[in-house]
Amino acid sequence: MLGILRQKVGAGSSSAMILGQSMQRIRPTTSALRAFSSSAKEMTVRDALNSALDEEMSADPKVFLMGEEVGEYQGAYKISKGLLDKYGPDRVLDTPITEAGFTGIGVGAAYYGLKPVVEFMTFNFSMQAIDHIINSAAKSNYMSAGQINVPIVFRGPNGAAAGVGAQHSQCYAAWYAAVPGLKVLSPYSSEDARGLLKAAIRDPDPVVFLENELLYGESFPVSAEVLDSSFCLPIGKAKIEKEGKDVTITAFSKMVGYALQAAEILAKEGISAEVINLRSIRPLDRNTINASVRKTNRLVTVEEGFPQHGVGAEICTSVVEDSFGYLDAPVERIAGADVPMPYAANLERLAVPQVEDIVRAAKRACYRSASLAASA
Amino acid sequence: MHQWMRKSGTIVNHFKSLLLVTNNLSSWRSYSFVKRSQFAASFAHNLPVADRDFINSSTHFCPRRFESVKSEKIANNVDDNQALELPEGKVKFTPKLRFISETADERECCYRVLDENGNRISSSNYVEVSKEVAIKMYTDMVTLQTMDTIFYEAQRQGRISFYVTAAGEEAINIASAAALKIDDIVFPQYREAGVLLWRGFTIQEFANQCFSNKADYGKGRQMPIHYGSNKHNYVTVASTVATQLPQAVGAAYSLKMEKQDACAIAYVGDGGTSEGDFHAALNFAAVTEAPVIFFCRNNGWAISTPTSDQFRSDGVVVKGRAYGVRSIRVDGNDALAVYSAVHAARDMAIREQRPILIEALTYRVGHHSTSDDSTKYRPVKEIEWWKMEQDPVTRFRNWMENNSWWSDKAESEARNSARKQILHAIQEAEKVDKPPVADIFTDVYDSPPSHLCEQEKLLREAIKRHPQDYPSDVPL
């Protein structure tokens, strides 16, 4: 239905190392484009991340990048392209394959005052190192009473890609967002990618930066302001991608694109949806979400991760706590299926949210179709 | 060395002038000989004035001191036709079907300078220690012993919740600290309070932490003995086992990038070497050529697990070679041996930009912690033997007395003074207020985010509404 095109991208000579690197192309959301500047300049998310890294490394000699394949290979997804040549092997470090090792080393370097950017080939691999992310990075500032701050960025692709099965298709937003001491960001567009990565690198606290493999090759219009090397986005602020008055849809990462497509379909049926791009999962911009719900009186949350204790659950709680009286309909939660990701393409498609799921949920919230509760 | 030079041009320039050739041992020997005065001078520069004399007058660096076994340089005289060319060098072929033995013919020796009676073994080569430094080492060992005894008792009396002693490992604590410089970054496990003591952390500061009052640098956020002090370059103790090892490599890598004349040192117990972090750290340290010392206190017991159940290798020292890390085994109850080994390790780590592994053999004379009764799983006789026959403090004292640097009078003065100071510090620490409400919320992030400010506001309002339900020992 989306005209999904699966295309293997040549992963070079050592393709065996990169599990099913693939791209999924989503039809450009033309309505979203108008929200950006009228400038014709476009940039892929990959180039946005690459230029943000480049500019921050250039601006601050304390910033360095480490991870598997980030140097000679230019990154499993080419995010670090050209950086080894420019900054040399001291600042673009190819590491042995031990996530717990290089994450611990990154944390130690941050203790001492460097600003490491640790790349996980995918966030699925960060589980090998989660002790260092949670017990060391997130807690050290508190446990040392401010004596040791940990200015570090953990970044890499997160969530479902395409055709890589249960162990490589998981969203970690809710996992890391549950931990005090961490900040968790998840960009959607090139503007997000540039502005948020720069903010993450400059931030004095540890930041988990969740990218999406399927967005790397997507192009988005970018304004001159976004391209300026001083550009930076605030952490903890969501962005209203599309204003609307009938229903609020919250989403992050790839799901923002789906939400925008859903909004377009809904518009044709006379429903005006407001799409919030969360950008920051922790801190969560409760004010923007609640203000929107108080205006639209309806809420649909969208995420690719598992439903239980997920980002949607937290947003729902926030709205129940702060804006319960404003709700005109039950909150609708769209999430990945509560199963490990199946490999077969037909089942995989069913296990992650699709645009029509969002459309249906929004209609239910607006009482334009039978609610799930009513049909049960 | 070659690979590192290829990888890091900028750092190479810095060290080119210092580092000549390390490819064969003879030039290494002559190097250490020629450069020793220069090195000694730079070392002395960082010591208090009173300590400098010992460097100039009495330190003699034996030329054979840093020799490492020859086999660590892989022989390169392989016939090209009979060898495999691999990225890390050539490998010879053999027609023999032969497996490498799981054990060496002999166990790795243990370096020792003082015998059990504190007499110096005449053939030993070691780094000499001046009278002033030796006296500070000994008095710090006495203070550490006394502090452990009194704090342990305070825990038994219910005045603090938890404590860990360094009993039996006083020489490891103090002598390793004495061989380092204050710029070296310490990543402790948890049985190294003596390192912090040597660096000038006061008895009162120890007491404030254990009693988690508001003067504690950790603001009462961690269990007793989780000390940390920025100004002493002592990273806050973490309760997790072995995570400090890769972190130390990261800090060492930072020192390398900034071309600092310093190293990182990470302490770990024998049990900690079974953690994945130990292996990751050694491998990464070798590959990144980071100036870091891994100091393993092999005290025989990981809580109730003896080393025979912990690993089947010849202890920890042999694991260095598997990762390409130079290593030494040392008698952990011999302060002079520990001092010399760490001194030499530090020198090599910084000058050659390489990691070093030290395994110190010792015995945990105390229980693992106050939550443990070790007589349940090991013979009291064994504990007593180590306590009475192998005590590192007594051994060092005997050596001091042999040198006429210590007397019974000095002994009773040192012990009395330590005891008085510690009892006083405990009384003072108990009088100080506990951490205030605000300390729950600060330092989660560099600056408090809005949701935490909101929570603090709500808490304060709740306290205002229900003052009678609010505990009186938390200052507002």
Image (spheres, helix red, strand yellow):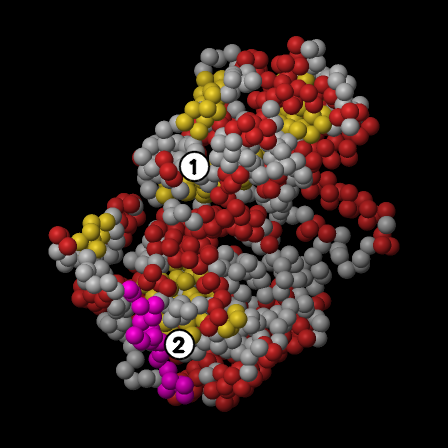
Residue at 44 percent of width and 59 percent of height: B278
Q: Nearer the viewer, residue A253 or A93?
A: A253
Quadrant occupied by the N terminus of chain A: top right
Part of the protein shown in magenta: B99-119
As drawn, is B470 to the left or to the right of B226? right
Q: Taken as a whole, is the magenta stretch helix, strand or loop?
A: loop
Q: CA distance from mark 2 to mark 1?
A: 49 Å
Question: Residue drawn 27% across and 72% down?
Answer: B65
Which quarter of the image is occupied by the C terminus of chain A? Answer: top right
Q: Quadrant of residue A371?
A: top right
- Please tell me whether residue A251 is drawn above or below residue B355 in the rendered image: above
**Picture coordinates of residue B463, whole percent (x, y):** 81, 49
* For residue A81, side relative to residue B428 (left or right): left
Which residue occupies 41% across, 42% down?
A: A67
Q: From the image, tell me which residue sits under label 2.
A: B331
To which quarter of the image does residue B180 belong?
Answer: bottom left
Q: Tell me if I can see residue A289 in this picture.
A: no
Q: What amino acid type should be assigned to the residue bearing mark 2?
A: Asp
Callout 2: SS = strand
Please give left or right for residue A141 compared with residue A81 in the image.
right
Q: Magenta segment: does it hold A62?
A: no
Residue under label 1: A19
10 Å crowding of disc 2: few (<14), some (14-19), many (20+): many
